[in-house]
Image (cartoon, grey):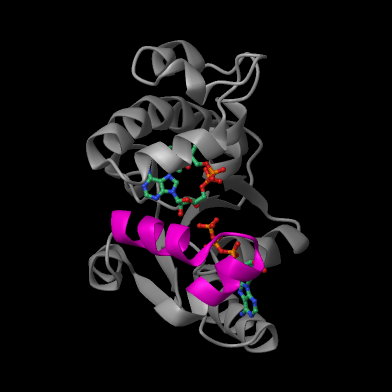
């Protein structure tokens, strides 16, 4: 089975690119979605998170209050790293399970959509790392359209690796500072050049 790791900074278009695979029937594992599950009611990361976050960061039902936490951690790198470690452990467990299940099911391809390219549970699992990138002004505009304030978008970008740091980890970087039709075209070229050439057909 071929494991395609897709990563990139916030608002660069990883989920949009991963969705092209989903539409083609490919199994896609979404790390952000898993991180939401493990911090929702009864989530496996909550007990540990309660030890390092104030009570105001939790809803009455015990789940994480994402807005409160975001307001706190994207201003405080130490706390961000602390909660990220706790959540990543649970997310990585789930990703490993999904990859194992896909292997058991003899799937030819699985896609991992992961914003933060950690070594264990992403880079070490991926046969090919694809970075989706876009210019900062384009990202901020798209994130604003999605409802994130400009300042909050800039704050998150500042917490993440730079384009150059992402590129160092990548087998290939695709520029998504283009419209959706052009991105779809780049997807088709990627499939032909990097997957079909390896005997993988969607
Ligand atoms: C702070 C939280 C509660 C804010 O939740 P919110 O619903 O607003 O955002 P969401 O989780 O959907 O993430 C959206 C994007 O924010 C960026 N982001 C999230 N966590 C981080 C982080 N630790 N460092 C840098 N950027 C991050 C990513 O680009 C991500 O795609 C949440 O992001 C969180 O728990 N982060 C720590 C865990 C983590 O690293 N998750 C991301 C990958 S598993
Ligand atoms: N080529 C494009 N043209 C127009 N809008 C786009 C394009 N690519 C992505 N978008 C939009 O930009 C926003 C960010 O894209 P997307 O959610 O795919 O990014 P992401 O990298 O997964 O972000 P996040 O890190 O927040 O999960 C979305 O609202 C998406 O619909």
**Is residue 195 shown left or right of residue 121?**
right
Closer to the camera in the image, 96 or 1: 96
Q: Is residue 22 visible?
A: yes
Residue at image coords 40%, 32% = 88
Tell whether position 151 is magenta.
yes
The image position of residue 148, as x and y in percent, is 57, 59
Residue at image coords 46%, 25% = 90
Q: Which residues are magenta?
A: 140-159
Tell whether position 71 is magenta.
no
Q: Could you say which quadrant of the image residue 52 lies in?
A: top left
**Is residue 135 shown left or right of residue 113?**
left
**Can you say which quadrant of the picture contains the C terminus?**
bottom right
Relative to 141, residue 108 above or below: above
The image position of residue 112, as x and y in percent, is 52, 50
**Is residue 84 shown left or right of residue 195?**
left
Relative to 139, residue 161 above or below: above
The image position of residue 59, as x and y in percent, is 61, 21
Q: Is residue 7 visible?
A: no
Q: Could you say which quadrant of the image residue 83 lies in?
A: top left
Relative to 112, residue 64 above or below: above
* Magenta stretch: helix, strand or loop mostly: helix
Residue at image coords 39%, 75% = 173
The image position of residue 126, as x and y in percent, is 40, 51
Closer to the camera in the image, 122 or 41: 41
């Amino acid at each position: 089975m071929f494991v395609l790791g897709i990563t990139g900074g916030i608002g660069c278009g990883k989920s949009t690119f991963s969705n092209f695979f989903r539409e083609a029937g490919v199994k896609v594992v979404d790390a952000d979605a898993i991180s939401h599950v493990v911090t929702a009611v009864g989530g496996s990361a909550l007990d540990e998170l309660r030890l390092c976050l104030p009570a105001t960061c939790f809803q009455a039902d015990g789940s994480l209050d994402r807005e409160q936490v975001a307001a706190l951690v994207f201003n405080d790198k130490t706390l961000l790293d602390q909660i990220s470690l706790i959540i990543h452990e649970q997310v990585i467990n789930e990703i490993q399970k999904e990859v194992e299940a896909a292997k058991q099911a003899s799937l030819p391809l699985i896609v991992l959509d992961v914003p933060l390219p950690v070594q264990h549970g992403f880079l070490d699992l991926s046969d090919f790392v694809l970075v989706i990138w876009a210019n900062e002004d384009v990202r901020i505009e798209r994130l604003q359209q999605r409802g994130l304030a400009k300042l909050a978008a800039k704050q998150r970008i500042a917490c993440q690796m730079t384009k150059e740091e992402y590129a160092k980890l990548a087998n290939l970087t695709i520029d998504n500072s283009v419209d959706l039709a052009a991105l779809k075209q780049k997807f088709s070229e990627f499939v032909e050049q990097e997957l079909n050439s390896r005997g993988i057909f969607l």
